[in-house]
Each structure stands twice: as C-alpha cells, then as structure tokens.
Image: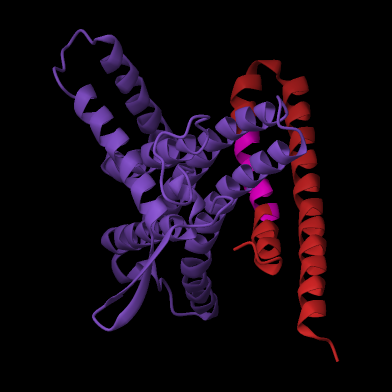
Chain colours: A purple, B red
Amino acid sequence: MSETGHWIYNTVIAGHAMSFNLDTIFTMWFAMAVVIVFALIATRKLSMVPSKLQAVCESIMQFFWGTLDTMIPNKNRQHVPLVASLFLFILTANLMGQLPLRLIHLKQGELASPTNDLNLTAAMAIIVLVYYVFMGFKAKGFKFLFHEFSFTGVIMTLVELIEMITRPLSLAIRLFANILAGEILVSVALGLFAYLLPLPVMLFEILVAFIQATVFMMLTIAYVSAATGDEH
Amino acid sequence: MIDTNTTMELAKLGGGIAIGFGAIGAGLGIGIATKGLMDAISRQPEIAGKAFGFFLLGAALSEACTLYALVVAAKLIGLM
C-alpha cells in the first residue's frame, strides 16, 4: 500500500467476484525477473578459475550452505533451492521499495515493494508451511504429528496443530508490517521536513530489508529443522 | 447513543492507544537485548562481530511485535 492505496482490478471468474492488486503483481514480476536474469547471467560460462561475478555468487552460496550447516545437522543441502530463492526474492523485493527513483510508473500505487502487500507474504508463508509439513511427514511418517499415546503426547499434538496456524501468520505479518511501516515512516518524515530528514530513515530501511530477508530465511530453516530433527 | 462519527473518532483514539502500548514491549525487548550484547562483548571482546549479527536478528524479532500492534492500529484508523 502506498499513499494512494492499491491499484485494484475487479473481475468475475467462474461466478466468483475476485479482485487483483495489480501493482503488487507487476512489481512482483519485476523482482522475479531481476532474480532470474541475475541467476542466468551468473551461471553462464562457469569455470574453475572464477570470474568476479562467479566469485560473488559462490560466496552467496557459501552463506546459505554455512547457515544450513549450523542449523540442520544432516542432509541439509536439499533445502538450498527453497531457502535461497526465498532469501533472494525477498531481498530484491524489499530493496525495490527503497529506490529513490521510481523505475516503473503505474496507474496507482507506484513502485513500492511487492512485500508491502499481505497477500504476497501470506502466499510465501503458506509455501513454507506446506514445505515443512511435507518434510516432516517424509522424515518421520505419521510420528511427525503424533509420537506417543499419552497425555503429554496428545497435548504436544494439539500444540503442533496450533503452531501450524500461528507460524505462517507471524511469518506473513512480520515481513509485511516491517516493510509497510518503513514506507509509512519515510512518508511521515517526508511530510515533516522534506529536505534530508527522510535520508537516514531510508538508509535504515535498507538495513531492515536485509534483516527481514535473513529473519524469514532463518525461521524457515528453524521450522524445517524442528520438523525433520530427532528431538522433541 | 453514540453516532457513527463519534465511533470513528473513538476508533482513531483506540489506534493510538494500541500502537502506544505495543511500542512499550519492543522498547523493553530491544533494551534487554542490547544489555545482553554489551555483557557478552565486555566479557569476550573477540565475539563482537558474531554477537552483533544475533543481536540484530533478535531485535528484528522483538520489533515485529510492535508491528503487529501497528497493523491493528492501521486497521482501526482505516488506513488499510
């Protein structure tokens, strides 16, 4: 949401009234295109003696591998595709909202981050939910939900079921509210004193973009680790 | 006998109260996290870089609780 609100397109599909936030869709496509083009350029002409770009990408992969190694003990490299694409996409999307020059001019809701829309972050949180539940069932079978028939076991199952609702909810609202609060903060600072006052706020928002992408990734890894690990 | 206009004004008041109380929690949380960071660095100065990363992570997590209050406040004053 920007100062003018979303650019909403209402339509009827198969008898259901639906509304699409077109600004979110376009900015999301732009962020996806940036990530995909970067990945294509980076993986072309790989060599044993890395070029500068390849060295940068290898250090990014080292970051993901190191984080996974510290948090999941064994068989951790299989989670790299989900974790890496979530991190890179969220980082690109967050940073897009902080560009001083708006690159694309839309009808309404200028190029702000697509992550300032609850629909996008909720979709990503549900992807994480499906992934960790699937991984849990794959690793432990039915014991993932119900490990012993006792009073504690039943209580733990209920807690697990409640967590399946609260975890995606908190993931989605945390990212969405952080980015939205940043944009509101910039516009409030702009309204107070338009010269130089928004600048430190915008620099702070760049830091927040990195931190929120890292937090989303860390929590995803923690949930997968708790679902597939032996403890609890 | 409260008319619609008064209800809207009261909802805005409620939004202000919500974000105010929400900010207390995150302020306390980040303060305690900073205290922990200072303790850790003064005990072992060589882990400063690593501890600062975890501090930022924890600060972001506790700040998120205020932002839940912000969402409620934005809902109340009709911003969303």
Asked where in the image residue B58 lies, by quadrant, the reply is top right
Q: Residue at x 59, y 47 (%)?
A: A178
Q: Residue at x 53, y 34 (%)?
A: A98
Rendering coords of residue A110 (x, y %) = 47, 45
Q: Any magenta on residue B77?
A: no
Drawn side of residue A153 relative to residue B40, left or right: left
**B56 versus A167 height, above or below:** above
The span picked out in magenta is B55-66
- What is the total number of numbered labels drawn onto the structure image? 0
Q: Which sits in the foreground, A22 or A59?
A: A22
Drawn side of residue B38 relative to residue A73, left or right: right
Drawn side of residue A52 relative to residue B3, left or right: left
**A120 versus B63 height, above or below:** below
Rendering coords of residue A4 (x, y %) = 56, 54
Q: Residue at x 51, y 55 (%)?
A: A171
Q: Which sits in the foreground, B67 or A128?
A: B67
Rendering coords of residue B11 (x, y %) = 77, 72
Q: Any magenta on residue B64?
A: yes
Let me know if residue A75 appears in the view: no
Drawn side of residue A91 relative to residue B40, left or right: left
**A73 versus B23 height, above or below:** above
**B54 versus A13 height, above or below:** above
Rendering coords of residue A185 (x, y %) = 68, 43
Let me know if residue A40 appears in the view: yes
Name the residue at the bottom extreme. Answer: B1
Please name the predominant secondary structure of the magenta segment in the image. helix
Q: Which sits in the foreground, A89 or A155?
A: A89
Name the residue at the top extreme. Answer: A49
Q: Which sits in the foreground, A184 or A122?
A: A184
Name the residue at the right extreme. Answer: B1
